[in-house]
Image (cartoon, rainbow, N blue to C red):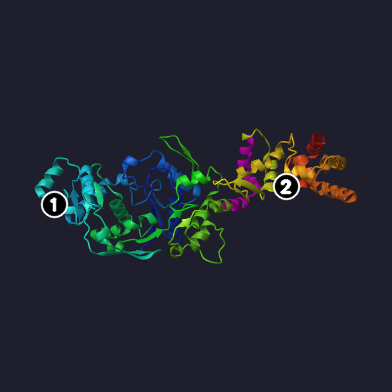
């Protein structure tokens, strides 16, 4: 095994949008492949034609392009082990089904759904296995000529794997160590269905992994119960020497409560569970995506990487993809589920936004301004971003709790920045900040004096560097404390950046106009 080139695969089903848990699985496969100089294969599991959803495959590919997770071969990428869609590999699977039948490792079963339901009612906890198979209609219990006749007349059938009971099957898992299960608890899984001439997941994946020379199968914990069956299938084909190493990743858990993360959790608490926005082609329902909510792809990747994997002490939480590749170690993945801390995801986005210059925020910010009827210039928009990007905002979480957080998305800016572009027309005298900082009689006089001080500057002098010493000197000489009242004039409430920066941004004419309006309105 050590001499083989590392090859891993990510094999989603085109049954809808890609869940964020699937993204994490693909990411871990990517990190493992890159660290070992190996290959990452993109394979489509579409053997269940009844669940196929138009557009899902293109959606999955676009999601990985946005995230920056690159595949080496597979659907849309090419390669020497194709085709990479399982629906295009029917003839390949039939050959291996026949091989198992000829070797007596599998058998044909003709039981109808009605017959199986009747047996389940008759036998408590019924399982199709060594104890019950001879009671059913299959090639083990029927005469050969009857089996041949049923097949020849087009009777629908399935091919089941014949599992011998009483054996401990061991799975060497890179995360969980030795996992052992007795074969007596396994049922004779269906491997192939004559109805659509397609294999089930179990056979298709074993055959594909073998033929595509996959060395490691890194997948979610939910697939762990099927691992012993896959070990037995490898042995049945005589492929023990090329059996991949398994690694079953911990589940992503709900942010609150018990159980696996679901779309319902995201809808309730206000976070996406899909990388991109998804519109259901049947119902038209739209589900939010990380991209459309304003997340940066590198923030999503960094956040997901640390859900179930810890690089160890001494390493910063913020890591580039290349740094993750160097540090990644499957043995440092948790065995227990990882709580999906979506608030931490917003923190990651805040950190990555700050790494981008304000000029890179402006296209998205300009779009928001235009949606609100405001036209500005990239230069002025970048000024606003620079002044406000470190502000804290208040928000209400999915459980109706008031909380605070840093600006995590460009869209967070608009509620905080409206006053840069729109002057306050009215003032809420019941607002705590206004009530505290605007005293009847004295404040209006003080603001009127400050207008006189500012009026001494011409337009070209209305800068932070020239305004600040002039206003500070006047305040010291008169004992005035004008800054909060000045903020009421320019903003209307107690938010915003440094007052000198704000006044310089607004300019001499707009600043004085707002002050005179506030004096008249508040008295």
For the C terminus, which image quadrant? top right
Quarter assignment of residue 229:
bottom left
Residue extending furthest top?
373
Q: Residue at label 2? A: 497
Query: What label does residue 141 carry, if any?
Result: 1
For the N terminus, which image quadrant? bottom left
The answer to whether residue 188 is left or right of residue 266 is: left
Classified by dominant secondary structure, the portion drawn in magenta counts as: helix
| Nearer to us in this view, 481 or 418 | 481
Q: Secondary structure at mark 1?
A: loop
472 in magenta: no
| Nearer to us in this view, 383 or 447 | 447
The answer to whether residue 224 is left or right of residue 182 is: right
Q: Which residues are magenta?
A: 348-370
Where residue 217 sits: x, y (%)? Answer: 37, 58
Q: Secondary structure at mark 2?
A: loop
The answer to whether residue 122 is left or right of residue 346 is: left
Label 1: few (<14), some (14–19) or many (≥20) C-alpha neighbours in 10 Å? few
Task: Count up the numbered dots.
Answer: 2
Question: On screen, 138 above or below 314?
Answer: above
356 in magenta: yes
Question: On screen, 105 above or below 193?
Answer: below
Where residue 22 sits: x, y (%)? Answer: 43, 51
């Amino acid at each position: 095994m050590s001499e083989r080139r590392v090859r891993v695969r990510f094999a989603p089903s085109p049954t809808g949008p890609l869940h964020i848990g699937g993204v994490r699985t693909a990411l871990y496969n990517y990190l493992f492949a890159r660290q070992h100089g190996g290959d990452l294969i993109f394979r489509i599991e579409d053997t269940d034609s009844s669940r196929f959803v138009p557009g899902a495959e293109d959606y999955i590919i676009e999601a990985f392009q946005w995230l920056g997770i690159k595949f080496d071969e597979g659907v849309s990428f090419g390669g020497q082990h194709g085709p990479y869609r399982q629906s295009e590999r029917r003839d390949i699977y039939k050959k291996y089904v026949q091989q198992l039948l000829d070797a007596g490792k599998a058998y044909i079963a003709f039981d109808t759904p009605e017959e199986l339901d009747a047996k389940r009612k008759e036998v408590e906890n019924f399982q199709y296995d060594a104890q019950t198979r001879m009671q059913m209609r299959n090639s083990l219990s029927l005469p050969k000529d009857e089996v041949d006749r049923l097949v020849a007349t087009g009777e629908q059938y399935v091919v089941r794997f014949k599992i011998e009971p009483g054996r401990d099957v061991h799975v060497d898992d890179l995360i969980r160590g030795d996992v052992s299960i007795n074969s007596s608890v396994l049922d004779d899984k269906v491997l192939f269905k004559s109805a659509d001439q397609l294999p089930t997941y179990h056979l298709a994946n074993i055959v594909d992994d073998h033929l595509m020379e996959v060395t490691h199968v890194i997948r979610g914990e939910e697939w762990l119960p099927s691992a012993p069956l896959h070990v037995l299938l490898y042995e049945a084909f005589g492929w023990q020497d090329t059996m991949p190493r398994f690694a079953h990743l911990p589940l992503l858990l709900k942010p609150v409560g018990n159980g696996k993360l679901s779309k319902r959790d995201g809808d309730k608490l206000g976070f996406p569970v899909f990388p991109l926005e998804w519109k259901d082609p049947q119902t038209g329902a739209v589900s939010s995506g990380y991209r459309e909510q304003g997340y940066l792809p590198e923030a999503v990747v960094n956040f997901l990487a640390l859900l179930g994997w810890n690089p160890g002490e001494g390493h910063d939480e913020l890591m580039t993809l290349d740094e993750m590749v160097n540090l990644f170690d499957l043995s440092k993945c948790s065995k227990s589920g990882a709580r999906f801390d979506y608030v931490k995801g917003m923190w990651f986005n805040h950190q990555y936004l700050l790494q981008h210059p304000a000029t890179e925020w402006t296209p998205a910010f300009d779009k928001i301004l235009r949606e609100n009827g405001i036209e500005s210039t990239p230069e002025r928009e970048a000024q606003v971003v620079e002044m406000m990007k470190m502000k804290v905002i208040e928000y209400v979480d999915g459980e109706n709790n008031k909380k605070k957080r840093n600006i995590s998305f460009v869209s967070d800016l608009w509620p905080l920045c409206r006053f840069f572009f729109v002057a306050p027309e009215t003032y809420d005298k019941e607002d705590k900040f206004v009530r505290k900082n605007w005293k009847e009689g004295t404040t209006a006089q003080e603001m009127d004096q400050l207008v006189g001080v500012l009026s001494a500057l011409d337009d070209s002098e209305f800068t932070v560097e020239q305004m600040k010493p002039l206003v500070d000197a006047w305040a010291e000489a008169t004992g005035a404390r004008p800054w909060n009242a000045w903020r009421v004039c320019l903003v209307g409430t107690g938010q915003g950046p440094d007052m000198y920066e704000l006044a310089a941004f607004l300019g001499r004419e707009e600043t004085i106009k707002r002050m005179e309006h506030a004096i008249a309105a508040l008295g």
